[in-house]
Image (cartoon, rainbow, N blue to C red):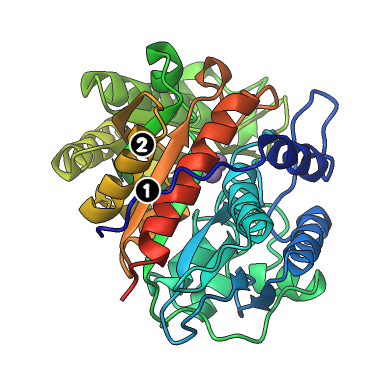
């Protein structure tokens, strides 16, 4: 990849304006965004994005899992595209930038090339992946996972809403995004994703750019604790098989397992269902999720052992059953050295201070890395807070990240082979 960096600059004000307009779709009272995957609001955001892409001269295709590809032609249509994008779906109490920034940065990149009348050798595709968050439909990164062959299409479409049970496929059809195109299995020259860091490292270091070298591994579990429902009044304490007491001890153990593998381990219980959830009935059943993360797979394996032992001990202590089911696992994922170098060179050429960083969050780039060279560009977010309605980022950092994205993409789009 010898082509010189061109130091082209995007229109930061236009990028910010697009982000703020998009953030109106699903806007919450606290300044965040709730735009769950395959909801009506997701559909509205998708249509806004498609309209903008078509106005920028792109041809838009939607595949059978709802992934959106907006293609800007290059001189040589036979070359595989250089892709850049992220996701439009959010957490229930999400922010304006998680996912949206990467999709809008891709759009701004195309708008800037149009302003300059700049023609690349290879085509460029802006991508909005379906259901990256994995909040409404688990697991996460389903659209990019099907594209990369990690999940079968039927498996992805069958994912149930975690409350109503309606499937992702039915909801995509309902909002008009069960597309005609086959999913994946086509060549991709390179994939870049711009994203807020969602953690405190870049802000604490005072750096506008993170050169993401890879993402840590994840293991997700579903734990079902079964005891016995009984009356909260006449049932003596020693005779109880209280599933919620058992689950509470297991949840505390999850936190202790994360702390025991400091400084890099992360351990979270984010979803709990208690049955029958009645204040004067002893809970007979508790379902909860576990999210483990670590940069080393061997440590994730040890955390798995720790979890199973802790749940077994907590259950047997009060006569409960505990089922610990691993729901999802992806190993630590390194990004492509050539693309990492392109990101680093673009940041350096534009005079942006930067550092290498490993992603604590999962991203669609993790699955794209299985089928194409992939890399990411991080920018700081205020206070390192994300998956929270107060999520915020500075316009100048978002612009810097988009400038680096533009020049890294050009590095590949003009030397794609
Ligand atoms: O869970 C994650 O890391 C991402 O936000 N889906
Ligand atoms: Mn994201
Ligand atoms: Mn997210």
Residue at the spot of label 1 = 5
Is the N terminus in the top left, top right, bottom left or bottom right quadrant?
bottom left
Q: Indicate the secondary structure of the residue bearing disc 2.
A: helix
Query: Mark 2 — residue?
Result: 349
Residues at marks 2 and 1 touching, judged by CB atoms closer than 8 Å = yes
Q: Which sits in the foreground, 243 or 113?
A: 113
Residue appearing at x 75%, y 76% in the figure: 173
The correct choice, above or below, for 13 with respect to 141 in the image is above
2 left or right of 153 in image: left
* Quarter containing the C terminus: bottom left
Placement of 196 over or under 238, stated as above or below: below
- The residue depicted at 31 percent of the width and 49 percent of the height is 342
Closer to the chain start, of discs 2 and 1, is 1
Residue 316 image point, x, y percent:
31, 34
- Is 12 left, or right, of 341 in this rendering? right
| Label 2 – label 1 distance at C-alpha | 7 Å
What SS does tag 1 mark? Answer: loop
Is 379 placed left or right of 115 in the picture? Answer: left
Q: Residue at x 67, y 33 (%)?
A: 95
- Viewer can see residue 223: no
Judged from this view, the residue extending furthest toward the left is 298
Residue 332: x %, y % from top left: 25, 47
Q: Answer with the quadrant where ligand 2 appears in the image.
A: top right
Where is residue 374 shown, x and y percent of the image? Answer: 34, 57
């Amino acid at each position: 990849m010898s082509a010189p960096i061109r130091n082209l600059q995007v229109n930061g004000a236009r990028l910010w304006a697009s982000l703020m307009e998009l953030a109106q779709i699903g806007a919450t009272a606290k300044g965040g965004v709730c735009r769950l995957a395959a909801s009506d609001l997701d559909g509205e955001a998708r249509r806004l994005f498609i309209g903008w892409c078509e106005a920028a001269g792109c041809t838009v295709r939607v595949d059978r899992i709802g992934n959106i590809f907006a293609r800007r032609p290059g001189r040589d249509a036979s070359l595989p595209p250089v892709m850049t994008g992220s996701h439009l779906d959010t957490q229930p109490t999400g922010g304006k930038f998680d996912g949206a920034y990467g999709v809008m940065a891709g759009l701004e990149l195309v708008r800037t090339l149009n302003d300059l009348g700049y023609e690349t050798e290879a085509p460029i595709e802006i991508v909005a992946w379906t259901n990256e968050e994995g909040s409404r439909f688990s697991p996460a990164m389903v659209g990019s996972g099907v594209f990369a062959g990690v999940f079968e299409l039927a498996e992805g479409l069958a994912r149930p809403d975690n409350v109503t049970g309606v499937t992702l496929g039915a909801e995509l059809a309902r909002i008009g995004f069960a597309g005609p195109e086959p999913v994946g299995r086509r060549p991709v020259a390179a994939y870049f994703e711009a994203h807020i860091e969602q953690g405190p490292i870049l802000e604490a270091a005072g750096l506008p750019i993170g050169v993401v070298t890879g993402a840590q591994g994840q293991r997700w579990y579903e734990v079902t604790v079964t005891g016995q429902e009984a009356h909260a009044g006449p049932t003596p304490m020693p005779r109880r098989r209280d599933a919620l007491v058992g689950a509470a001890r297991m949840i505390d153990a999850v936190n202790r397992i994360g702390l025991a593998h400091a400084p890099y381990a992360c351990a979270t219980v984010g979803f709990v269902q208690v049955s029958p959830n009645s204040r004067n009935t002893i809970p007979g059943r508790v379902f909860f999720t576990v999210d483990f993360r670590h940069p080393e797979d061997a440590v994730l394996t040890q955390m798995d052992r720790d979890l199973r032992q802790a749940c077994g001990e907590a259950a047997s202590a009060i006569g409960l059953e505990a089922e610990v089911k691993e729901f999802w696992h992806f190993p630590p994922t390194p990004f492509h050295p050539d693309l990492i170098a392109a990101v680093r060179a673009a940041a350096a050429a534009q005079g942006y201070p930067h550092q290498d960083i490993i992603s604590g969050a999962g991203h669609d780039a993790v699955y794209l890395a299985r089928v194409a060279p992939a890399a990411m560009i991080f920018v700081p977010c205020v206070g390192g807070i994300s998956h929270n309605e107060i999520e915020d980022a500075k316009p100048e950092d978002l612009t810097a990240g988009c400038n680096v994205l533009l020049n890294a993409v050009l590095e590949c789009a003009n030397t794609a082979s």
